[in-house]
């Protein structure tokens, strides 16, 4: 198996990001975004997906959390896209439901090369710490767009912390399943022979 690792550097007037992602990792993380709950979610994402993730973001948090969360998702999505290359041999499709106490989140993914995003549900509170709850949805959408995923998410519960954490864990487990190498398969898992067009 090739080394499915990518490093992405992203710098704008709003954020500066260094991100290294290893798809075939062990869940090792070193994450610093300046938003405590977001760091917790990214750590959970890497841990439950068994991705190694090193990420540092310096963002304009004096404005709000939007640019930081969005740009981190862009960087991680781009890293997935680069690390997976032409997606040779991957499983491609996967789905997972993950509970956290009263909350449950579901993810269905096609690592298709065609970005699409669908979301069903609401978050029970507007904020968790300094993290705007709806930014969890926006994180997933930006990740899907930049990783080339068709992504369907849903969430239900009574506590936004639980809802968001279940969502990140469900997304992680599903991506881990879908990006695994299927030893029975030769080439790209598509009848048209490519997942990049």
Image (cartoon, grey):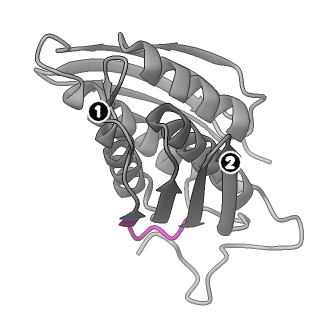
Residue that appears at 48% across and 19% down: 39
Which of the two residues, 1 or 68, is positioned nearer the viewer here? 68
Separation of marks 1 and 2 at Cα, in angstroms? 27 Å
Q: Quadrant of the C terminus?
A: bottom left
Q: Nearer the viewer, residue 180 or 183?
A: 180
Residue at screen point 69% across, 60% down: 96
Residue stretch in magenta: 110-118
How many labels sit on residues? 2
Q: Is residue 46 above or below residue 191?
A: above
Q: Residue at x 58, y 82 (%)?
A: 193
| Residue 117 within the magenta-colored segment of the rendering | yes
At x 63%, y 18%, the residue is 29
Question: Going from the N terminus, do you reach mark 1 or mark 2 first?
Answer: 1
28 lies above or below 81: above
SS class, disc 1: helix
Q: Can residue 55 be seen in this snapshot?
A: no
Query: Residue 156, how many percent across, how many down?
Result: 51, 55
- Asked which secondary structure carries label 2, the reply is strand
**Badges 1 and 2: C-beta atoms under 8 Å apart?**
no
Tell me: 80 left or right of 120. Answer: right
Q: Nearer the viewer, residue 19 or 154?
A: 154
Residue designated by label 1: 71
- Residue 99 — which label? 2
């Amino acid at each position: 198996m090739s080394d499915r690792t990518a490093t992405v550097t992203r710098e704008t007037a709003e954020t500066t990001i260094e991100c290294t992602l290893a798809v075939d990792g062990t869940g090792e993380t070193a994450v610093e975004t300046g938003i405590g709950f977001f760091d917790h979610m990214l750590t959970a994402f890497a841990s439950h997906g068994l991705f190694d993730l090193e990420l540092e973001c310096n963002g304009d948090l004096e404005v709000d959390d939007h640019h930081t969360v969005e740009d981190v998702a862009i960087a991680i999505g781009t890293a997935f896209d680069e690390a997976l290359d032409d997606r040779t041999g991957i499983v491609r499709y996967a789905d997972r439901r993950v509970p956290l106490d009263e909350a449950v989140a579901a993810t269905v993914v096609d690592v298709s090369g065609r970005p699409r995003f669908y979301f069903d549900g609401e978050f029970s509170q507007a904020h968790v710490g300094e993290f705007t709850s709806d930014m969890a949805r926006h994180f997933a959408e930006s990740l899907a767009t930049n990783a080339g995923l068709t992504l369907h998410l849903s969430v239900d519960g009574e506590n936004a912390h639980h809802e968001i954490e279940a969502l990140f864990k469900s997304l992680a487990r599903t991506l881990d399943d879908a990006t695994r190498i299927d030893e029975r398969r030769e080439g790209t898992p598509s009848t048209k022979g490519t997942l990049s067009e």
